[in-house]
Amino acid sequence: MSDPTRRAAGPAVVPPRLDTVPQADSQRVSPVEGETVFDLRDVDVHYGSFRAVKDVGFTVVKNEITALIGPSGCGKSTLLRSLNRMNDLIPGARVGGLVSYHGKNIYDADVDPVEVRRRIGMVFQKPNPFPKSIFDNVAFGPKVHGASRTERESIVEDSLKKAALWEEVKDDLRKSALTLSGGQQQRLCIARTIAMQPDVVLMDEPCSALDPIATARIEELMVDLAKQFTIVIVTHNMQQAARVSDRTAFFSTEVNETSDIRTGVLVEFDDTQRIFSNPSDERTENYVTGRFG
């Protein structure tokens, strides 16, 4: 099988698995079953000299929803962006450790970050449709990659159906995407992401700007999409994580007593039901029961 993130030229080089690397003492990570999509080992993220996240390790399984939860400033979104190299776009940002995607370190020198982002799409906190028609929003990526007009029409319809938006917009595909409601715009952005046929969809607080009804639609959509895609979501809404995710990673912060600098750490990673009903770490229990955060 060819390397999923590699440029066309040259042989694939698959790094050895690092099964003997110990997890940091401060975190508890339960083993998982199923096909591994991401395997994170000792992941650090720096912005210049500031270490935003340290020593993170857990596994993401195919066709599951993995939720990242924790208080503000604990590095959830920073870590999420490291999964498709979005941090490359921030001056001074660098990622250490291993971010293995289907057995390949996505930060190896021979990996094309553009191809990484095609295979690992992202939906952002605030809906960000292009100032174009509904059709052109969804067709944008396939058009850039050379899809014919007929192919684009098929992709647009299929993607809007998968995003549960087709019936609402099928007669208005030439209307500006900016005329849609907030919830519709977010579903359009999801359709635009899956139009590129990714393997993974990352979602950074996709419901934070939406009302409860629109949030429920997005949650239903996520559960349905997980039949076809692997999903990793950052959310501040613990009830949302409990409702939609299969596994949950709880993050907190360590404070440097001298400088008061806060660094994000993974406290616990486990089945979502166990995280919310019987966590192993007191910090997790305090957070999910509302005692802090």
Image (cartoon, helix red, strand yellow):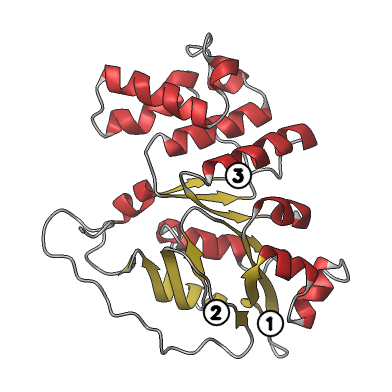
Image quarter of residue 164: top right
Classify 10 Å Cα crowding around label 2: few (below 14), some (14-19), many (20 and above): many
Q: Is residue 92 visible?
A: no
Spatial CA distance of label 1 from label 2 is 10 Å
Q: Amino acid at mark 3?
A: Val
Above/below status of 58 relative to 163 = below
Q: Are marks 1 and 3 in contact (CB under 8 Å)?
A: no
* Residue 253, percent from left and from top: 69, 77
Classify 10 Å Cα crowding around label 1: few (below 14), some (14-19), many (20 and above): some
Name the residue carrying label 2.
54
Mark whose residue sits in front, 1 or 3: 3
Q: Is residue 200 visible?
A: yes
Above/below status of 254 relative to 84 = below
Compare residues 57 and 275 and report the one nearer the observer.
275
Q: Which of the two labelled residues, at mark 2 and mark 3, occupies the earlier sequence position?
A: 2
Q: Secondary structure at mark 3?
A: helix
Farthest-out residue, top = 171
Q: Amino acid at mark 1?
A: Glu
Residue found 67% across the figure and 42% down from its top = 219
Farthest-out residue, left = 10
Q: Are marks 1 and 2 in contact (CB under 8 Å)?
A: yes
Classify 10 Å Cα crowding around label 3: few (below 14), some (14-19), many (20 and above): some
Above/below status of 32 relative to 142 = below
Spatial CA distance of label 2 from label 3 is 30 Å
Name the residue carrying label 3.
223
Spatial CA distance of label 1 from label 3 is 33 Å
Q: Amino acid at mark 2?
A: Lys
Above/below status of 174 relative to 158 = above
* Residue 166, percent from left and from top: 53, 20
